[in-house]
Image (cartoon, rainbow, N blue to C red):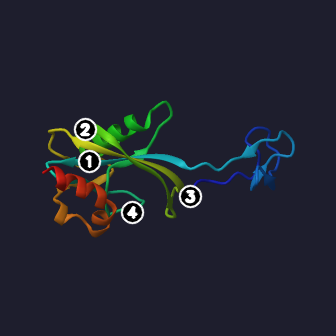
Amino acid sequence: MRPEYNFCPVCGTALSSGLIEGRERDFCPSCQFVNYKNPLPVAIAVTVKDGKFLLIKRGIPPRKGMWATPSGFIETGETAEEACLRELKEETGVSGRIIRLVGVSRMEDNEIYGDMLVVRYLVEAGDEEPVAGDEAEDVQFFAIDELPDRYRVRFKDLIAEIEGTR
């Protein structure tokens, strides 16, 4: 989880708690700094090629050892689309082309990062052979019937879309 402020990062005064803008928030009684707790922005590449989905086996926490979609934090100065394609390349060695936005949702990671705002894109994979990056143990394409159960559920609408175009 992200660290909590006990003291104001602007002036060093001990933070107080109070109702601000309808929510209980920590604030500085001296300089009026408000400690807004915002979600971390994450981009996810739901990557497909020839009707198969590209997944990585996570090599680091959270969810180390689990199959997942390539994803990562959106960095300062970067768009969600740029982060999506950068993370795809870093984690799989595969380039891609964004087809469309799949959705935006909130996700809670209780292991490390806390509250996240997740932006998912449907991405068409390039022609490179997938190679696991530094943060992945493995990477491979899965046919729809080979997908881990949670992804068959999560990708239900995309699967129907893909199967309808084959």
Disc 3 is placed on an element classified as loop
Amino acid type for the residue under numbered disc 1:
Thr
* Label pair 1/4, CB-CB below 8 angstroms: no
Callout 3: few (<14), some (14-19), or many (20+) C-alpha neighbours within 10 Å?
few
Mark 4 residue type: Arg
Question: Residue 21 in the image: x percent, y percent?
Answer: 76, 49
User: Quadrant of the rendered structure where residue 158 is?
Assistant: bottom left
Q: Label 2: which residue?
A: 96
Residue marked by disc 3 = 1
Which amino acid is tagged 2?
A: Gly
Q: Residue furthest right?
A: 30
Quarter of the rendering occupied by the N terminus = bottom right
- Give left or right: position of 8 versus 146: right
Q: Which residue is mark 1?
A: 47
Report the residue at 30% width, 43% height from top: 88
- Residue at disc 2, secondary structure: strand
Question: Alpha-carbon distance for marks 3 and 2?
Answer: 31 Å
- Identify the residue at image location x=41%, y=49%: 103
Report how far apart the C-alphas of labels 1 and 2 lie in the structure: 8 Å
Which residue appears farthest toward the front when viewing the image? 164
Which residue has dot 4 on it?
63
Q: CA distance from mark 1 to mark 3?
A: 28 Å
